[in-house]
Image (tube, rainbow, N blue to C red):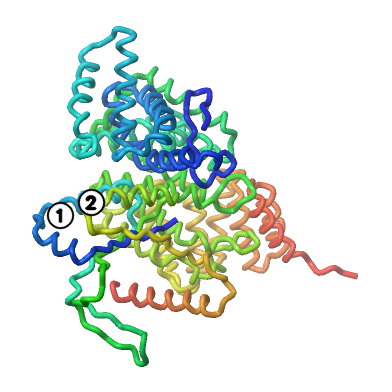
Amino acid sequence: MTTDASGAVHVSGVEEPTTSTSRNPDADRARRALGAVWRIESARIIATLTRFVGDVGQAEDLAQEAMLEALRQWPSEGVPNNPGAWLTTVAKRRAIDGWRRRERLDERYAAMARDLEQQDGAASGQFWDPDTIDDDILRLIFVSCHPVLSREAQIALTLRIVGGLTTEEIARAFLVPVATVQQRIVRAKKTLAAANVPFAVPDPEQYAERLGSVLSVLYLIFNEGYLPAAGEEWTRPDVSAEALRLARMVAGLMPREPEAQSLVALMEFQASRFRARVAHDGTPVPLDQQDRSRWDRAQIERGRAALARADRLGRGRASYGLQAAIAECHAVAASTDETDWARIVVLYEALGRLAPSPVVELNRAVAVAMSTGPASALRIVDDLERSGRLAGYPGLPAVRAELLSRLGRSNEARGEFEAAARLTGNERERAALLAKAAALAPPVVE
Amino acid sequence: MKYMLIMRDSQEAIEASKDLDFNEIIAAMGAYNESLMKAGVLIGGEGLAGVEEGFVVDFDSTPPVVTDGPYAEAKELFNGFWMIEVSSKEEAAEWAKRCPLGPGSKLEVRRVNELEDFPQDNEWIQKEAGWREELEKKAAGSNG
């Protein structure tokens, strides 16, 4: 256990043997139990504390102090019956002690003290008030993804206070130094405090936009595992699993938001392909070559159920709904040839109208190539290239290379594969692209 | 990682539960399921119908013997299961402990094998993957 510059406690789980010590089995057991409790309860604990102290940063600091206290007490006294309640109560006492020292006992703190007294006898029963806790967690999620924060800060804070991940876990997930994550979190807390961001769900006129921000933070986290922008590994499923858990959480808290349900569906469909996307030697396997028997069928069914839930709300399909529907087309198809590419083209057209994006346009080109042939697809890709909107994006030359190759224009295709290889930051992807380029090399003339 | 929480109740616990308020049991289980769902960890689960509707196929002899329920010799009965997806064994234990069950009940918690747990070059493993796909295709076909 360590304390970093931000005062954060790091409780490593079982998967972190580097910091675990087996010299004291009680301490080890308590530390692991605390890690598990923290993952389950962190959002509720911090949400409850924020309601009282009004500031997420301060709430998180108090929760961290309670964690330290748990690490002192639990090894000898055992894990309490209701560990989440225990941590919250300890944190509230810390808050009140602090205010007493500073003689700043105003009405808010008096209310918290009363609340504590009432709960003291009932710590093993129903601790969380079901009428308020869900709303408080939603507030916490909206605050973590508040627009005053940078995307990086939103991601770090969401994983830390909603997901209950340690700074080390976040650093590992994003392949950045621990100090960088610490800085992001400290700065994010300061920014929220300085901007006086209220602990509240956004007003109706901002709701859609703020929800969009929450969902895109979760999808960015998911994609960090699904399509890592950097590093040697082609996938990092743990990061995606965490994003999926948070998305299910948000969908559970907002059962009437079709886009929240749709995001779950999209992630389930994409995650169902994880184990088919990488060959045994670590090289990426493209969709058309994946062994579809390795797709997780149960997960696909969960995705279809989530998409059906979204559709049942009767408000049509927006961005995530359309993307999930496209992913569903792939998920239910027995092979590339049997995929309903015409339907995918239509879905991409709808997506492009709703949220115009050059990446969507590029994907539409791939679907067009499959449904009507490479020549019409190449026209879309050439337009994209001329627009310059995807300059520097490795996917553009990679798709263009595939189309040129199918049209028999091997020399041009080879150049495009090489261009894509120069642009990608992922080592595995680069190797795969260079291999394709090499396969198109002209025969050596004696 | 995925874990299955398997509910096992003794005959006494099942008898005792008949005196309890059924609505209360349902409410407590509903709240538990909702907490799993809202934490984003629940991926499946079912409750099982009474033993009188079930039967046991015993392979001690050939051909196997079918015994209709209820079966007096069973000390504990499986009554339902949950499938959860969590980050550690400890997290699975923490969720299991929160299940609203009483004396005479147990939760057996087992990690679910992933395809990766088996040798991938085994012919039967490959065939099973194929069967699963066929079954899913049929299931997908039947619900449109």
Q: Mark 1 belongs to which subunit?
A: B
Q: Quarter holding the C terminus of chain A?
A: bottom right
Contact (Cβ within 8 Å) of mark 2 with mark 1? yes
Q: Within 10 angstroms of label 1, few (less than 14), some, or many (20 or more) residues?
A: some
Q: Nearer the viewer, residue B57 or A175?
A: B57
The residue that mark 1 highlights is B25
At x 32% / y 19%, what residue is drawn? A95
At x 35% / y 30%, what residue is drawn? A143
Tag 2: amino acid: Pro
Report whether A426 appears left or right of B37.
right
**Residue A315 image position (x, y, % from top left):** 24, 51
Q: Nearer the viewer, residue A436 or A57?
A: A57
The residue that mark 2 highlights is B100
Q: Mark 2 belongs to which subunit?
A: B
| Mark closest to the chain's N terminus, 2 or 1 | 1
Report whether A165 appears left or right of B41.
right
Q: Is residue B87 above or below residue A291?
A: above
Q: Quick one: which residue is furthest to the right in this view?
A: A446
Q: Is residue A194 above or below residue A239?
A: above
Q: Quadrant of residue A401?
A: bottom right
Badge 1 marks a residue whose secondary structure is helix
**Residue A443 image position (x, y, % from top left):** 81, 69
